[in-house]
Amino acid sequence: STETFKLNTGKEIPAIGLGTWQSGPGEVGNAIEVALKNGYRHIDTAFAYGNEKEVGEGLRASGVPREEIFLTTKLNNPWHKRVPEALEASLKNLGVDYLDLYLMHWPSSTDPSDSKKHYEDWDYVNTWHELQKLVDTGKVRSLGVSNFGITHLERLLSDPNTKIVPAVNQIELHPANPSPKLIAYLKEKGIHPSGYSPLGSIDSPLYRNETLKFIAESKNLSVAQVLLLWGVQKGWSVLPKSVNAERIKANFDLDNRDLTEEEVAKIDAIPDRFKVCGDKWLPIKVFFGDDE
Ligand code: A2P
């Protein structure tokens, strides 16, 4: 699908992007190349995934010009006090001179010498103010956040030094983590939601969901395609991860396909709830339930 959404910066973000969380070495470069050769124009990575270098190799191997690609990476938690250096490190890894979107990966900073230690003297709101300075350098086209709840955004937006409203909040979004309150809040503030783990990640129980299976079979689509159509029709971009050429192609092949309002409503009514990515591995609590 070549559909796009407009960000509050005026830039367009393609509705379908290739996710690369858990895409391993030796496979992620090829996945990027296959995706770009098959029409994808949106790639999502992060310093924390440890694959930026290989992602960059894939970008170049595809032959697709840099300016046609929407490229996102994220500020890693141990770099909150050295934002300009973090950006330079990611640009160097990727072999590019600008990003389309730079996200604060988590509203949580950690001491680089100890990933279990939260910086008590530093606030993610300060990090945002450092990030804001990058826009004038031309190295970052749009700025956003990830894994932010309403609590975090309220504090960020009410700070007098906040001059830029995040263009994007990238969060976990699938029918078992639909976060309607947060989505409504983002809409009100003009912040575009982007959904990670749209398929429910590895060994997803969503493939066995009867509602999704029924809709998929009746339309001659895969459950994965139904999940992606649902997200895009709800108004967010989706970031399916795959390193398999056939699945990479199928996840993009959604032109002229859509769900009826009834089908969307049926998926909205799925009662199952699970989160793929929790906050237990972080030194501070991040998810307060206000993202529901
Ligand atoms: P693989 O990389 O082998 O294709 P999510 O995007 O929600 O994080 O889900 C990613 C997981 O879903 C990965 O394990 C990926 O495996 C798998 N996957 C990606 N696309 C499809 C698909 N179309 N059908 C089934 N599984 C898929």
Image (spheres, grey):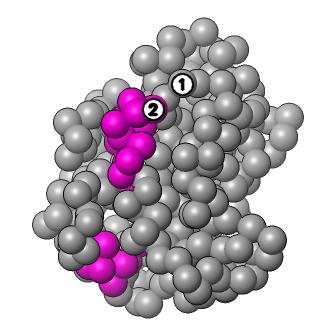
Dot 2 beta carbon under 8 Å from ligand 1? no
User: Considering only vertical position in the picture, is 28 above or below 160?
Assistant: above
Give the quarter of the image for residue 189.
bottom left
Query: What distance separates the C-alpha of mark 1 from that of mark 2?
Result: 6 Å
Viewed as shown, does residue 225 lie left or right of 63? left
Residue reaching furthest to the right: 26
Does the rendering let one see residue 180? no
At 20% from the left and 36% from the top, the residue drawn is 10
Depth check: 67 or 133 in front?
Answer: 133
Could you say where residue 257 lies in the image, as x and y percent from the top left? 32, 37
Does residue 35 show up magenta in the picture?
A: no
Could you say where residue 150 lies in the image, as x and y percent from the top left? 31, 79
Viewed as shown, does residue 242 lie left or right of 132? right
At 76% from the left and 48% from the top, the residue drawn is 50
**CB under 8 Å between discs 1 and 2:** yes
Q: Secondary structure at mark 2?
A: loop
* Residue at numbered disc 2: 139
* Residue at numbered disc 1: 97
Quadrant housing the N terminus: top left
Q: Amino acid at mark 2?
A: Lys
Q: Residues within 10 Å of mark 1 (few under 14, many from 20)?
A: few
Q: Secondary structure at mark 1?
A: loop
**Extent of the magenta region:** 132-156
Does the rendering let one see residue 57? yes
Give the quarter of the image for residue 144.
bottom left
